[in-house]
Structures are given as structure tokens and as C-alpha cells.
């Protein structure tokens, strides 16, 4: 009994630890003061108005969303075939291949960003959307690879063989059998990938301009000169967008797999 | 017309040669078992017939059509997998309807064919369940229904009963054989269990070290083994080096020009004084061990250095005891000779 109370207490504390910063941000975004304050001094939506009426904020929000969505899509198209190749086939240099694909996980993004700026120039990859996209794809592909690879098991392979045996070609088999089986890894990997792209500063900062900016870089630039509640409003808007996205995913694909045990 | 013809097929994995010049033909409606210890190449052969492995050399034809290089989904055969390989995200009905759907059959028609197949395996009430909600035996039946729903000419079964407990396995053996006769499909059945192979097969292909040692009807594989391996692997036997002409048994360690295979049920153990009949071969020896397993008793007799097995129904008589000098006797007709010297 005492243990159960303790477990519950620890769970509540953990949740508080995770959620309280969000409460502070959302609270601070509602303050009437001209500086960040928590608890908020009075309640107003003025700072949201400031943000929405600022075209640079809106533009960077759109850029960030498009960038994260496009990068996630490209990363999926790269990571899924790569994962299948690594899990299913033996080829020379396989260990090196998967090592290279996973290496961005341990490389400082700042270094990657600087390198991309230096070596991307001859390819026309400087300070444009494509340059941002290439960089983001590099850093988020490993997330999907990591979550999908463990699901491509031997059992999974015999399901694919059964599908082939019953008359399905390789592509039909992928969409009818493989994909439904690795769905949980694909969705969770894609969520991680999207978020990682959406909040990235270190890599993006090398290739953003006044006209082409992502929301975190925009915030980063802004707080160097002034700190007012509008940055809290931007952050809060991001949080709300994330919550909305999670709800949409839950309603369409379902998040039940996150607690699946089998 | 021959249904399946495997012709001089070889396969190696790196330096390991899994199959060496294997040839095998199967008639329509026939039940053939590939029997052998693990690593003998039986599963490799099955997977090559199914198309999951490429042959290095040789050809595979079905009804005269060369399928050696066809991908698995274009071969006119189906497989029952060892671990069933049921799709966990599909219901039982959807699992069974998967084949007809891939063949371009309408949803309604596929469902009705699937129901028919489920009916055949006695699972018509389970169509809306999911595989994980079913027992091993039921999953086994679903896998069978899924494999026969497209009415293939040839069904490949990869140790399909190995995961079931003994009671259920025996029942499924009978049931599987009944279904096979009912639908008239040829079965190629991989197993390492000789009793299973004996109970079900029209013919048995005994495999060892990547080769087919013998293909024959079950009683012949037992009574007339072609090689030392088959004699040793199928059932129990005493393998004795002999002189081909006289059938005289040579002492342990010597090499005769033939080897005698004597099954334990043909060997009598006679307490002295020996009552030897005409035409019988006898050896004097001493009882080493007596092992009773209820229905039968095995007596191990050491004679001329060889360990000779004899079997009696029921419990050992009180006339025999360990260490006792005895005479073993067996009829000349009960001796099957195979070529080659004893090692």
C-alpha cells in the first residue's frame, strides 16, 4: 500500500517536472508586463497579436513547418529502404554503411552546419531552402533508422516470405505486410525526426537569411537584442501546434502502439 | 506426368555445401517427406523449391515448366511455415483471403473461398479472431487453410507440427493426412521426426550431408535401407560386418565385404541351452543391459565385440538377467545387406 502511494507520488512529481516549464512559458506569454514575468501580471493575448502581426514570425513559422515536414518525408524515403537493406541483406561494407548513416547522431550539428556551408557552395547549396533541407535530412534520418531497424526481425522476415508465397510481389508485400508491422517504429521515428528538425538552431543558423528563417533561429536572433513576452508567445504557439499535431496523429494513425507490449 | 522435378540441384553458402546434386521427382497427389537430422539440407531444398533461395546449379520444374528462376510469388505452389507466419495485423479470415486477393479475386469471392478453406480445417467459427487470440494448434490450421485456399498443385510444409505438443502432434498428423487425401494436393513435408514421416508419407526421402541417401516407401526405407546412414538413422539396428557369401559375422574391428542390418525385433535372445532352428544365424554373447519401457524391452547383448539389440514385447522374462551368457539368433531372411565395409 505504502509502495503504491510512493509510486504514484513519484509519477506525479515526474509529470510536474515535465509539464511545469510549459506552464511557465504559457503563463509568461499571457503577462501584461513588457518583460518576461511569471506568474504573469494580469492576462492578455497582446503578445500573440504582436507575433501574428509580425510577418517575419509568420514566415519563419511556415518555413519551419514546411522544412520539418519535407525533411521528415525525405528521411523516411531514405531510412526505410536503408533499414531494409541493412536488416535483410549481407553486402560488403554493410557495417560501414550503417555506421555512416547513424554518425550524425554523435556529430555536433554546429560542425555539420559549418561543413555544409563550406562544401555546399559549389553545389549551389547555400542559404536556400534546399540547403536547409539537405542538412536536416542528414541529422534526422538516423532517428527513423534507429526506431525501424529493431522491428525488422527474423519473424517479420518470414511474414514477408509468407506474403510472397501467397502471390504478392515485393512492393505489395512491403505495403501490405512490412509497413503495417513496422508502423510503430515509423511513426515514432517520424515524430522524433520532425521535432528534431523543427527545433534545430545549430545547423539551420548557417543557412538562414533575413528572408528565409526558421522559428528557432528567429527566436535565437531575437533574444540577442531584446527579451519580451513575444518569445514566450511564439514558444507557446509552438507547444500548441505540437499538441494539435499529436492529437491529429492519434486520431488518424493512433498512438496506442506507444504502450503496446507485443 | 511428373508434378515436381528437382534435377541435379546444388547449393552452397560460402564454403559450406548445403546441397550436392540432389534429384527428386514427385507425382501429383503424392505425400513425400524430406527426412533427416538438422543441417542435412532438407529445409534448404524446400526453400529452393519455394523460391526463397536461388540454386547454384541444376533445375526445378513443375509440370515440365522450368521454375528455377521464377520469384516465389509466381510459383504455382504454397508453403506452410514452421512458425506459421500468420499476419498478426489481419484477422483469420483476412489471413486466409490474402492469397485469393493477390490473385485478383474480388473481396466477396475471396472471403467466400477463405470460409470454405477454414471450414475444411474445422475453424469456420473463428474467422473474425486475430492470430494472437488462438492456440498453437488453431494457428497451425489457419496456416494450412491459408496455404490451400488458392488450390495449389503442390504444398510445401516446413516442420509444421514441430511446435505442437506430442498429443496434438499425433492428432494433427492424422488430420493433415486426411485433408491431403481430400483435396488431392501433393505434399512435400520436411521433418526430422521419423515416426511422423513413417505415419504420413507415401514416400520418404532420407537426407544427410546435403545428399538424398534414399527415396522409397516407408516400409522399404526401414526394411531395405540403401546406405549405412539410412540403416542407422531410421529405427534401431545392429550393423554387423559380414562375409557376403556365408553371412558369417566378423568380429568387431574387422572389415567384411558387406554389412548386415538386423532390426532388434528380429533378434531372439536365448538362454542356454540354445534352441537354434534351421536357417538361423547365432552368436554367443553376454547380456550387457536390459531396458524396459513398459510396452517393450530392449536387451543389449555384447557378442564378438558388437553390441546387438534385441526387442521383446512386454516385460523382460525372468529368464534373463544382466551379465548372463546367452545366444542371440536371427533368421537369414531377416538380414538386409548393404554394400561397403563396417567402419
Image: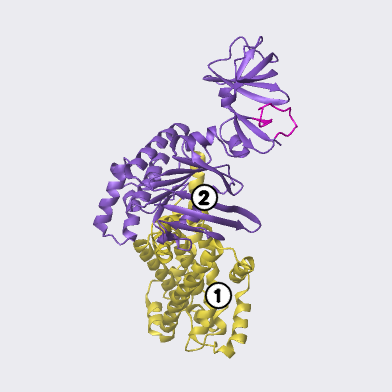
Chain colours: A yellow, B purple
Q: Which residues are magenta?
A: B239-256
The one nearer the camera, B128 or B79, is B79
Cα distance between the residues tagged 2 and 1? 38 Å
Task: Name which residue lies at 56% across and 21% down.
Answer: B293
In the picture, the disc for residue A138 is: 1
In the picture, the disc for residue A219 is: none
Residue B298 forms part of the magenta stretch: no
In the displayed structure, would residue B120 be above or below residue A185?
above
Residue B246 forms part of the magenta stretch: yes
Image check: A132 left or right of B178? Answer: right
Residue A260 x, y percent position in the rendering: 44, 52
The one nearer the camera, A162 or A6, is A162
**In this view of the protein, can residue A161 be seen by the observer?**
yes
Farthest-out residue, right: B253
In the displayed structure, would residue B113 be above or below residue B290?
below
**Which residue is labeled 2 in the image?**
A10
Q: Which chain is indicated by disc 1?
A: A
Residue A76 x, y percent position in the rendering: 47, 70
Amino acid at each position: 500500500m505504502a509502495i503504491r502511494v510512493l509510486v504514484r507520488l513519484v509519477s506525479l512529481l515526474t509529470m510536474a517536472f515535465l509539464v511545469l516549464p510549459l506552464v511557465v512559458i504559457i503563463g509568461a506569454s499571457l503577462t501584461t508586463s513588457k518583460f518576461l514575468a511569471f506568474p504573469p501580471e494580469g492576462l492578455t493575448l497582446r503578445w500573440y497579436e504582436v507575433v501574428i502581426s509580425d510577418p517575419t514570425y509568420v514566415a519563419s513559422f511556415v518555413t519551419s513547418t514546411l522544412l520539418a515536414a519535407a525533411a521528415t518525408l525525405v528521411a523516411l524515403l531514405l531510412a526505410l529502404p536503408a533499414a531494409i537493406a541493412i536488416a535483410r541483406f549481407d553486402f560488403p561494407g554493410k557495417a560501414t554503411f550503417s555506421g555512416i548513416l547513424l554518425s550524425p547522431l554523435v556529430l555536433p550539428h554546429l560542425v555539420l552546419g559549418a561543413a555544409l556551408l563550406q562544401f555546399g557552395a559549389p553545389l549551389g547549396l547555400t542559404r536556400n531552402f534546399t540547403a536547409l533541407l539537405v542538412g536536416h535530412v542528414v541529422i534526422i534520418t538516423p532517428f527513423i533508422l534507429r526506431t525501424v531497424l529493431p522491428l525488422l526481425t527474423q519473424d517479420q522476415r518470414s511474414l514477408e516470405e509468407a506474403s510472397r508465397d501467397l502471390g504478392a510481389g515485393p512492393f505489395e508485400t512491403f505495403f501490405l505486410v512490412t509497413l503495417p508491422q513496422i508502423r510503430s517504429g515509423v511513426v515514432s521515428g517520424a515524430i522524433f525526426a520532425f521535432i528534431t528538425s523543427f527545433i534545430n538552431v545549430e545547423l539551420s543558423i548557417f543557412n538562414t537569411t533575413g528572408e528565409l528563417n526558421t522559428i528557432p533561429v528567429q527566436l535565437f536572433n531575437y533574444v540577442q537584442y531584446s527579451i519580451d513576452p513575444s518569445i514566450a508567445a511564439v514558444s507557446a504557439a509552438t507547444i500548441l501546434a505540437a499538441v494539435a499535431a499529436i492529437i491529429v496523429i492519434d486520431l488518424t494513425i493512433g498512438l496506442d502502439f506507444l504502450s503496446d507490449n507485443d | 506426368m511428373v508434378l515436381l522435378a528437382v534435377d541435379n540441384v546444388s547449393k552452397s553458402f560460402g564454403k559450406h555445401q548445403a546441397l550436392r546434386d540432389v534429384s527428386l521427382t514427385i507425382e501429383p497427389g503424392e505425400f513425400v517427406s524430406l527426412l533427416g537430422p538438422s543441417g542435412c539440407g532438407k529445409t534448404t531444398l524446400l526453400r529452393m523449391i519455394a523460391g526463397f533461395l536461388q540454386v547454384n546449379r541444376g533445375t526445378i520444374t513443375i509440370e515440365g515448366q522450368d521454375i528455377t528462376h521464377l520469384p516465389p510469388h509466381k510459383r504455382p505452389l504454397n508453403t506452410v511455415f514452421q512458425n506459421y507466419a500468420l499476419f498478426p495485423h489481419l484477422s483469420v479470415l483476412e489471413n486466409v483471403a490474402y492469397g485469393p486477393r493477390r490473385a485478383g479475386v474480388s473481396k466477396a469471392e475471396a472471403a467466400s473461398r477463405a470460409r470454405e478453406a477454414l471450414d475444411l480445417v474445422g475453424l469456420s467459427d473463428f474467422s473474425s479472431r486475430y492470430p494472437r487470440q488462438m492456440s498453437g494448434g488453431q494457428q497451425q490450421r489457419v496456416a494450412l487453410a491459408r496455404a490451400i485456399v488458392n488450390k495449389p498443385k503442390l504444398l510445401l510444409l516446413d516442420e509444421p507440427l514441430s511446435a505442437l505438443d506430442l498429443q496434438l502432434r499425433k492428432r494433427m498428423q492424422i488430420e493433415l493426412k486426411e485433408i491431403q487425401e481430400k483435396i488431392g494436393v501433393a505434399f512435400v513435408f520436411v521433418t526430422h521426426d521419423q515416426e511422423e514421416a513413417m505415419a504420413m508419407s507415401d514416400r520418404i526421402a532420407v537426407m544427410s550431408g546435403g545428399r538424398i541417401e534414399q527415396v522409397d516407401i516407408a516400409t522399404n526405407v526401414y526394411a531395405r535401407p540403401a546406405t549405412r546412414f539410412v540403416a542407422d538413422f531410421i529405427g534401431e539396428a545392429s550393423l554387423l560386418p559380414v562375409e557376403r557369401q556365408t553371412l558369417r559375422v566378423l568380429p568387431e574391428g574387422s572389415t567384411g565385404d558387406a554389412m548386415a542390418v538386423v532390426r532388434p525385433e528380429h533378434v531372439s535372445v536365448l538362454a542356454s541351452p540354445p534352441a537354434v532352428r534351421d536357417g538361423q544365424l547365432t552368436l554367443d554373447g553376454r547380456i550387457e543391459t536390459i531396458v524396459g519401457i513398459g510396452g517393450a524391452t530392449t536387451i543389449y547383448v555384447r557378442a564378438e565385440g558388437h553390441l546387438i539389440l534385441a526387442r521383446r514385447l512386454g516385460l523382460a522374462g525372468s529368464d534373463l538377467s544382466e551379465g548372463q551368457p546367452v545366444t542371440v539368433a536371427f533368421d537369414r531372411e531377416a538380414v538386409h545387406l548393404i554394400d561397403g565395409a563396417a567402419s
